[in-house]
Amino acid sequence: MSNAEQIEYWNGEAGKRWAQDDDIMARLLLPFSQALLEHASLQDCRSALDVGCGGGSQSLMLAQRLGAGARVLGVDISAPMLDVARARITAAGDTCAELDFLEADAASHRFTPGDFDLLFSRFGVMFFDDPQAAFANLRNALAAGGRLAFCCWQAMKSNDWTRIPLQAALAHLPPPEPPPPNAPGPFAFADPERVESILGGAGFTDISLQPFTTTLRISEAPTLADAVQELARIGPVSRLLQGQEQGVLDKVFPAMESALLPYYNKGVLQLPGAVWLVTARNA
Ligand SMILES: C[S@@+](CC[C@H](N)C(=O)[O-])C[C@H]1O[C@@H](n2cnc3c(N)ncnc32)[C@H](O)[C@@H]1O
């Protein structure tokens, strides 16, 4: 997908659905937020850009962590998600950094050069069609010595939360056209060498990728069938199921239930998820 197609995608059904489910996503992704905030060097940071901020739950956490006197700007291409994000501004109290949001393409927007101490992102940087150019553009917005910190998914084989439902669904669906290698998308930064090459090519130094794995609390639901309905709304499986006929879904959902049974215990569906915590510095 080109950046223009990403803008269409994140302003269409997918963006609206994420906006509607943003509180669920914020709860689901909380372990990654906490790991990223611990891992990023936040000391002395007075201004941060949250790239692909979506509904802004992570921007708010960052603003709370940086505290009064600092500033956080969330940038995103999705109007419905930014509506959710802007509604969070009132939750930022006096002890919080100033929080604001901007609708713009982070890959090409002309930010004020050197304006930020930190470029930050939770899963918002894997969608650029030319990632090296996008990161070079973002680096211009960083002060000399400024830092980059983001998390991105490791390979699908390490992410059972999406691999298992996807495999179960694919038993009843024709496989989708394989995307071109390194196509923008949730798993575009799974290969650490590729990430190092993109960031190095964009002029970053001290590049580090640290693995982080956790158990994702996908859903608390009275039945496994309900939990599967929630899981089917997120990640690559949701893209696969979008627009499928009811007859197909009637086969897919029971298959997903069988595959996920071992992960459903006492009303909670939990599966492993693995990310890279990526940091780098503007020379
Ligand atoms: C997987 S969502 C993550 C949202 C948010 N960071 C979170 O963790 O809740 C990816 C986000 O990246 C945004 N995005 C994709 N391409 C972008 C671009 N070129 N510029 C700014 N935002 C972009 C999407 O609109 C979407 O909100």
Image (cartoon, rainbow, N blue to C red):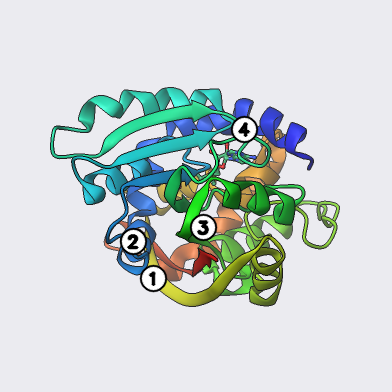
Q: Nearer the viewer, residue 104 or 157?
A: 104
Find disc 2 in the rendering and name its residue: 31
Q: Is residue 111 visible?
A: yes
Q: Nearer the viewer, residue 63 or 186?
A: 63
Residue 47 location, x and y as percent?
Answer: 36, 45
Q: Secondary structure at mark 1?
A: strand
Query: Which amino acid, mark 4?
Result: Trp
Q: Which circle's residue, 3 or 1, is located before the other in the chain?
A: 1
Residue 130, numbered circle: none
Q: CA distance from mark 3 to mark 2?
A: 25 Å
Q: CA distance from mark 3 to mark 4?
A: 29 Å
Q: Check whether the beta carbons of the residues at disc 1 and disc 2 lie within 8 A of each other.
A: yes
Query: Which amino acid, mark 2?
Result: Pro
Find disc 1 in the rendering and name its residue: 214
Is the residue indicated by label 4 positioned so its CB lies within 8 Å of ligand 1? yes
Residue 10, numbered circle: 4
Query: Which amino acid, mark 3?
Result: Glu
